[in-house]
Image (cartoon, rainbow, N blue to C red):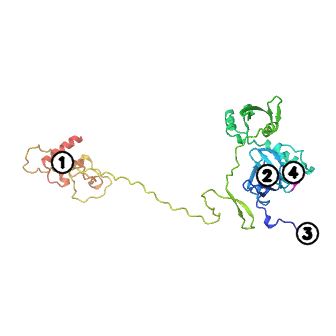
């Protein structure tokens, strides 16, 4: 009876493993402890990714091969024959392979993606050479659609300043040129004196022509960079700003379901633990009302002076609410002429009799303002209920009406 093969529970996939050019276990020497740590390593493009195990999909480290210089097999006494060193422009990394064959295969794949050619000086099997030729075709196709990292949108002067201020980042830089082409800026030291040179690369259809004494044709910008690097015996190094520092904080955590250790990216600082999507939401904090600035009190109307003899009008008859509260001026009778000042009245004058005024809306409207002098001057004394008006008050009212008119 045939049993169907299935993946064990502990190795159940939780994602999609990237399609590396080559992958296997590889030990890498830690710079702090000088001890080797075992990783599952995968080569993709010009980068080597390091995973905690072959069941993990999140790399914990990455090594950029664009600053590759050479390989060295020099080993201190006592180290295994499977060790080799990868010399970069600014560092040296030591590895330990599973076997001598695995060491040579790793070196062959690294040289293929760095030099864009299948190495011939290594002891490799025909099957390995066939796989490296396929990787070479993939890498050339990938670079044909990709702009090199050393290509920057800068001017000639800015390129010179970058190469001068950051010599540890490389000494070869690509920048835009005229007529759709590019320019190559390099900086080297000759006898302690820096020498900066610029080269023109023309664009003719899909081809890039390096303008030299013997023009050289390239299919991509990455091939242009590779031409300058290989022709100068790797003295020229592509300019690449330091990106070795990580931007995301993470840690290893055991999976609650199967006990595997997985890489977990932590949240932003101060954000705290994230709540599950289906859990209860934390109620928002109560809003605190902001006290508004108190408005200043409205100014009170000025109190009347005692010298101005204002009259407070009163109505003896009950008032009612009316729609039209204005009294026609034609119904107001003329007031008697006031007596001259100095004349002593003997008896109070008898108020003249006048026809009863016609009231609009069914009655006389009561004025809301108690201090209204014009209203008092228009209402006859018989309506207001005053028995008489003194001559002195009449004189003051006459003068006020004259000023108002």
Q: Which mark is residue 2?
A: 3
> Reading the chain from its start, which is encountered first: label 1 or label 4?
4
In the image, residue 348 lies at what x, y percent? 10, 51
Mark 4 Cα-neighbour bin, 10 Å: few <14, some 14–19, many ≥20: some
Q: Which residues are magenta?
A: 99-106
Comparing labels 1 and 4, the label whose residue is closer to the camera: 4
Q: Position of residue 307 (x, y in %)?
A: 18, 48
Residue position marked by numbered label 1 in the rendering? 307
The residue carrying mark 4 is: 104
Q: Quadrant of residue 221?
A: top right
Q: Secondary structure at mark 2?
A: strand
Q: Which residue is mark 2?
A: 94
- Nearer the camera: disc 2 or disc 3: 2
Marks 3/1 in contact by CB < 8 Å: the verdict is no
Mark 3–mark 1 Cα distance, whole angstroms, equals 125 Å
Q: Secondary structure at mark 3?
A: loop
Q: CA distance from mark 1 to mark 2?
A: 110 Å
Instruction: Find the distance from the CA under tag 2 to the CA under tag 4.
Output: 14 Å
> Measured along the vertical axis of the image, is residue 67 above or below residue 80?
above
Q: Horizontal and vertical percent for residue 297?
A: 34, 53
Pick the front one: 179 or 39: 39
Q: Residue furthest front?
A: 77
Crowding at label 2, few (<14), some or many (≥20) Cα neighbours within 10 Å? Answer: some
Give whichever of 104, 201 is nearer the camera: 104
Location of the C terminus (image quadrant):
top left
């Amino acid at each position: 009876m045939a049993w169907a093969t299935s993946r064990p529970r502990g190795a159940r996939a939780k994602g999609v493993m990237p399609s590396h050019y080559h992958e296997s276990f590889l030990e890498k020497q830690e710079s702090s402890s000088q001890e080797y740590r075992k990783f599952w390593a995968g080569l993709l493009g010009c980068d080597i990714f390091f995973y905690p195990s072959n069941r993990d999909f999140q790399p914990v480290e990455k090594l950029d091969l664009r600053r590759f210089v050479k390989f060295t097999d020099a080993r201190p006494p006592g180290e295994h024959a499977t060790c080799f060193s990868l010399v970069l422009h600014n560092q040296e990394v030591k590895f330990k392979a599973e076997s001598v064959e695995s060491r040579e295969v790793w070196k062959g794949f690294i040289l293929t993606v760095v030099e864009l050619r299948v190495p011939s000086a290594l002891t490799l099997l025909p099957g390995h050479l066939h796989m490296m030729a396929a990787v070479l075709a993939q890498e050339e196709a990938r670079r044909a659609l990709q702009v090199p990292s050393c290509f920057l949108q800068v001017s000639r002067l800015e390129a010179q300043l970058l190469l001068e201020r950051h010599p540890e980042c490389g000494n070869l830089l690509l920048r835009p040129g005229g007529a759709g082409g590019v320019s190559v800026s390099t900086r080297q030291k000759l006898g302690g004196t820096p020498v900066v040179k610029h080269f023109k690369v023309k664009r003719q259809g899909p081809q890039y022509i390096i303008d030299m004494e013997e023009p050289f044709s390239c299919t991509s910008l990455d091939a242009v960079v590779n031409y300058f690097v290989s022709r100068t015996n790797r003295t020229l190094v592509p300019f690449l700003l330091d990106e070795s520092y990580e931007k995301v904080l993470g840690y290893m955590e055991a999976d609650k379901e199967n006990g595997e250790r997985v890489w977990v990216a932590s949240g932003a600082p101060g954000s705290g633990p994230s709540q599950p999507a289906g859990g209860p939401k934390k109620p928002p904090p109560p809003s605190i009302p902001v006290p508004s600035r108190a408005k200043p009190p409205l100014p009170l109307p000025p109190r009347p002076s005692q010298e101005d003899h204002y009259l407070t009008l009163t109505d003896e008859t009950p008032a009612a609410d009316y729609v039209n509260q204005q009294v026609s001026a034609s119904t107001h009778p003329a007031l008697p002429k006031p007596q001259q000042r100095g004349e002593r009245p003997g008896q109070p004058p008898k108020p003249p009799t006048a026809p009863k005024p016609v009231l609009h809306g069914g009655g006389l409207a009561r004025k809301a303002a108690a201090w209204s002098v014009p209203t008092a001057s228009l209402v006859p004394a018989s309506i207001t209920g005053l028995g008489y008006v003194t001559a002195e008050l009449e004189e003051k009212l006459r003068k006020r009406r004259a000023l108002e008119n």
